[in-house]
Amino acid sequence: MAQPKTRIGLAGLAVMGQNLALNIADKGFPISVYNRTTSKVDETVERAKHEGNLPVYGYHDPEAFVNSIQKPRVIIMLVKAGAPVDQTIKTLSTYLEKGDCIIDGGNEWYENTERREKAVAELGLLYLGMGVSGGEEGARNGPSLMPGGSFEAFKYIEDILLKVAAQVPDSGPCVTYVGKGGSGNFVKMIHNGIEYGDMQLIAEAYDVLKSVGKLSNEELHNVFAEWNKGELLSFLIEITADIFGIKDDKGDGYLVDKVLDKTGMKGTGKWTVQQAAELSVAAPTIESSLDARFLSGLKEERVEAAKVFKSAGFGDILADQSVDKQQLIDDVRKALYAAKICSYAQGMNLIRAKSIEKGWDLKLGELARIWKGGCIIRAIFLDRIKKAYDRNPNLANLLVDPEFAKEIIDRQSAWRRVVCLAINSGISTPGMSASLAYFDTYRRERLPANLVQAQRDYFGAHTYERIDIEGSFHTEWFKLAKQSKI
């Protein structure tokens, strides 16, 4: 008997691809799967059998794979960004027909998505670039999905995405049509940039508590577990608590202490910072997290630098500060929360700036909603961010939302204490410090930028505006200075 046509296809069966295929099948949608390395196809079909005889059908041949899907065909690709995506499109489009749709679920540069959408449109095909967040676990049990591109294509697959996405009580499935062009990929990229900032801030909280507060891993586990019951309730705080509780299976002590202090990266954080520069949007928390990763990579240099400064009397910690442990824990919690608001504010400002530049009309409140579940940055306070944008869709910055402004005012003394304590102890807190500088710069009516602009006019005749008279002015500073010296 001929196999009935499946509802959807998925090409690219690394862990994310396999898990998403099984999730789709689990929700009652028969799915065809294909991978260039055929062993992965067999592995996925085998997993589907073990996980409840799920309707997953494997194909070793791209033509048979495409032909097994009902029309209009929808195929999700989960392959490595860049050239492999172009290669997969080329392979599949040979057999696809007008009206069929390709969805790229990888972490792709948004302009590549826009280029591909135009290219496949010439073949009569529809295209979506869809951010998928949540890691392996999310892909299998419910990720946050950020599709952008052809609205017609989104409508083809909306019923599937609504069931496959993470489900959050009170706010629904963590998926929405993001917008036109490469907006889905762009939003996912910024999500990852915010994630970089979040992780760095948590690492700094850990460093201060461990290095200055002398908390043990057991105490750190308890602190983060406790924090995860309140305002900081989030996936990243939850897994941080878990990490501190894991003993080393290859030796004594805790595993976290044996992990090399060198952070890897895939590139989305770097893209976010490049976009911040392109858009002239300040994103110092995200930028500092990227710099921290760069510096962490210089492990050998840091080992040598430590020797140089140790011989000059600089230890790892400059001075043992006598601290009230409970007070420190409370201060660090408040500092972490306040700095975290800054990280999200910067990410949202980047999305808004790009949306205006591209005419995407992105809804920031709706993006906060779909990040509430499934994704890596899911956190209880995203609900508050959504409400802030619901109250005022044109909110200039999260910091000036009345609720968030009050929270920062309530926490800023603790935040300053933590940053000062870290500085005096010789512990770097680039994320917390950059966030505090961002807040202090943004809240001040007058900045020393007048001097910088005067300098620019002095050496480059760049002109300046005045606070008391309309118009553009240039002063012969050099001549005036020369006269005053005579």
Image (spheres, rainbow, N blue to C red):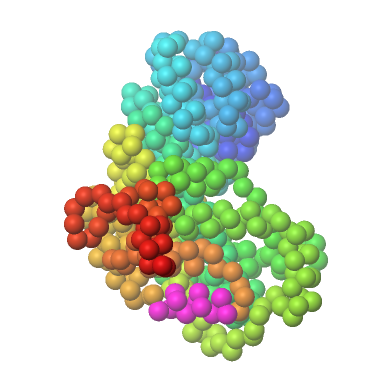
Q: Residue at x 25, y 49 (%)?
A: 472
Residue 63, given in percent of the width and then of the height, sits at 58, 12
Q: Quadrant of residue 385?
A: bottom left
Res 214 visible: yes
Residue 197, given in percent of the width and then of the height, sits at 50, 57
Q: Quadrant of residue 117?
A: top left
* Nearer to me, 77 or 328: 328
Residue 58, given in percent of the width and then of the height, sits at 61, 23
| In the image, residue 419 lies in the stretch drawn in magenta | yes
Quadrant of the snapshot with the C terminus: bottom left
Please name the predominant secondary structure of the magenta segment in the image: helix
Q: Residue at x 53, y 88 (%)?
A: 324
Res 258 visible: no
Q: Residue at x 25, y 65 (%)?
A: 402
Residue 75, given in percent of the width and then of the height, sits at 49, 23
Q: Residue at x 44, y 47 (%)?
A: 276
- Region rendered in magenta: 413-424
